[in-house]
Amino acid sequence: MTGKGGVGRSAVTAALAHIAQDRGTRVLVTEIGDDPEDYSPLARYFGKDRLATTPRELAPGILGAVLLARTGQELFLRGVLRSSTLSHAALRSDVLRRLLNAGPSFREMGIFFQVLHYLRTTREDGSPEHELILVDMPATGHTLSLTALPEVLLRLIPGGPIATALKEGQSYLNDPDKAAAWVVTLPETLPVSECLELLDGLDRTSMPIGGIFLNRVPVDPYTTRERELLRPLLDGTAVLGAESYWAPELAQRETARLLAGTRVPVYPLQQIPHANLVAHLAEVMGGARPIRRRTSMRP
Amino acid sequence: MKKAAAETVRVGDLIRTKRVIVCCGAGGVGKTTTAAALALAAARVGRRVLVLTIDPSKRLAETLGVERNPPDPVAIPADRQRLAGIQAPARLDAWMLDHKLVADTSVRRLTKTPEEAERILSNRIYQQASRMVAGMHEYTAMEALHRLVVTGTYDLVVLDTPPSRHALDFLEAPRRLSRLVDSPALAALLPKSDGMLARAASKVLSKILSAVFGDEFATEFVGFIGTFAGIFQALNVDVNAMREFLSGADVAFLLVASPAPTTLAEAHFFQEKTKELGLPFRAFVLNRSRALNVKKGMPSSLRDAAGGDVELESAVRKLEAAAVTELELAGRDVALLRDLELRAGEEATAVALPEMPAGADDMGTLIAVADVLLGS
C-alpha cells in the first residue's frame, strides 16, 4: 500500500484488513517504522498507539506488526550464522550494527527479510500463518527502493545467503498471483501527478501493480441546472460553501487526467465523514468497481 | 511584564532578516512549495535569494523555469523574475539536485586528488548503490548551504530538506555515517590498523561479513570502506562544524506540517528535538489549513439573487448546508493553529497557509502564498 502522505493510505489499509478478515482470511497488517517507540498512524485506526515488533492481535482476526530494519536484520543473522557464538557476536557487534544502520539498502534488506519471514511462517498443517500481508509504506520513495531492492542488490551480491533470500522474496513479489502494489491517491492536482510518477517508477521494477484507490472523491450535491445557475454567483467570490461547488469539478478533471495517464484499474472511493471512517470505507471498498476512460469504453 | 508586540516572532521578519531558513517536515505536506514561496517572498522585498532543494517535483522546476540537476545554482529566467515582481539587485536563484549528482559532488569535493575521486566513482559498489551511503546527500545539502552563505553571494538561502518521516533526519543521517567511521573494529579492517584487540575484532567481523555477504562481496566491501575512509573522516569533522553553523542567530528552522491527527504530536517532537540539538526553531507553518475560511462570509446573501427562482433557491440551500460543514472544519483548523501558537511559545510562531487543491506550483499562486508569508 503506497501513496504520498495525507491521502488516507493508512485508513484504506485498515479497511482492507477488515474486509479480508470479514471474508475469512488471516490477515497481518504491517507498517514500516524507524523506531519501535514511534507513534503509528495505522495502529490509530485500531485504537492503539503503536504496533508491536512481533505480530499481535489488533482486532479480532487481525494481527499487526511494525517492520523495523533491526528486527529483520536480526532474524536474518540468526538464520544465516548457524554458529551461535558467531551469531551472538554479530548481534552484539557495534560495528556491524552501525554498518547495517548506515546503508539504506541494508535497512531495506532488514524490512524485506522481516516480510519474507512472515511469508514463510506456516501453521502445523502447513498452511500459511498469514494468508494476507498488508504493508503500509510511509513514503513513495520507500516503495520504489523496496520493490527494486532485489534487482539492485542481486547485481551487487550475486551469491551467498543474502542472494538466496532476495531470490526467494522475488518469487513472491514478482508473481502477480501472490503480490501487488496498490496506490492510494486523491482526485487533486499534485496527488494525481505524483501517482502517475509513482506508477512510472513501479513499471521499471518487476512488482505487479494491483490498482489505484482514488480516495475522497467529493460528492456533487448539485444538479446540472443548479450548477449553471450558481456559477455566475460564485465565480470570483469567496463564500463559505463554494468548495462544495468547485471540488467536484476539480475532481472530475483530475480523475480524467489519471485515467488518461494509466491503464491500471482505478477504484473511486467517495468522501465519507470522519466518524467511523474505517468501517464506512470497508463497506464502500467491499463493493468497489473500477472506472474506465470514457473514450475506451467498449460494449 | 507583558511582552511588546514588536518582540514576537513574525515569519515576515524572518524572511526579511535571516540568512538561512531551513524547512523541515514529513513528505507530502507541501514543504518544497513552502520553501519556494519563502524564497520568492524574500526576493520580492529586495533580497538576493537561493532556494536549495533536493528531488523537487517536476512541475515546480517548470514553474520556476529552471532545469533540474545543474552543477551550480541557476537564476530563474529574467521574464519570470519580472513577472514575480523581483527587481535587481534582488534576485532569485534555484538549485534543484538529485541524489546521485549530490553524492558524486560530495566525493569530488571530499577527496584529495582527482585520481582518488575517480577511483571511488568507478568503484562497482559505489556505482551500483551510492544510495547505500546514507546521509551523503543530506550532508552535501548542508555543506553547499554553508559554502553559499559564507561566500556572501546570497542574502538568504532557503533549504528544503529531503522528505523523511522524521523532520530532522537530515541532520541525523550524516551522523550515522560518521559514527560508522569512529568504530575501532571497522578501522581495523583498514590497511594501516594496529593493536591486537582491533585485529581480533576485525577477524570476527570479516568472518561475519563473509558468512552474511559471501566471500566475494565481503572482500570487495572492505576494499570499498578502505577507499572511502578518507571521505568519512573529513565528513566527521564537517558534520560537527555544520551543526554549530546551523545553531547560529542568522538561522531559522521551520516545521512545515498539514492538519492531521498527528500534527500536534509531530510539532511537539520537532520542538523538543531542536531544543535538544540547540537549533533555532522559529515557526510552525501549517499548510493546507482551512483556518482562513472563517473570514469568508456565509452564502445567505446569494438568496436575494435567487429572486424566487425555485431551482436556484434549492441550490443556495445546498450551498448553505455545505457552508455549515466548511465552517466546522475551519473551526477545527483554527483550534489546531491556536494549539500550535501556544506550543510555539515566545521564541517561535505559527502561521497557516490556505488549502490549494489545484496545487501551488503556478507562479500566481506562489506569489499569493509568498505575500501571505510576508504579512504573517
Image (cartoon, rainbow, N blue to C red):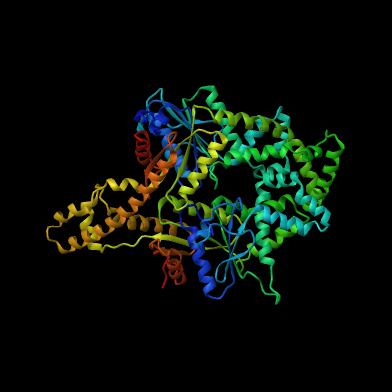
**Residue placed most toward the observer, B262 or A187:** B262
Residue A161: x percent and y percent? 77, 57
Q: Quadrant of the N terminus of chain B?
A: top left
Is B51 left, or right, of B304 in this rendering?
right
Residue A19: x percent and y percent? 51, 71
Q: Quadrant of the C terminus of chain B?
A: top left
Residue B60: x percent and y percent? 45, 41
Which residue is rendered at x = 59% and y = 38% of the image? B171
Which residue is rendered at x = 33% and y = 58% of the image? A248
Is A140 left, or right, of A91 in this rendering?
left
Res B166 quadrant in image: top right
Which residue is rendered at x = 65% and y = 47% of the image? A104
Q: Is residue B175 above or below residue B301?
A: above
The answer to whether residue A7 is visible is yes
**Residue placed most toward the observer, A114 or A201:** A114
Residue A108: x percent and y percent? 65, 52
Residue lying farthest to the left in this orientation = B307
Is A52 left, or right, of A10 in this rendering?
right
Residue lying farthest to the bottom in this orientation = A125
Residue lying farthest to the front in this orientation = B1
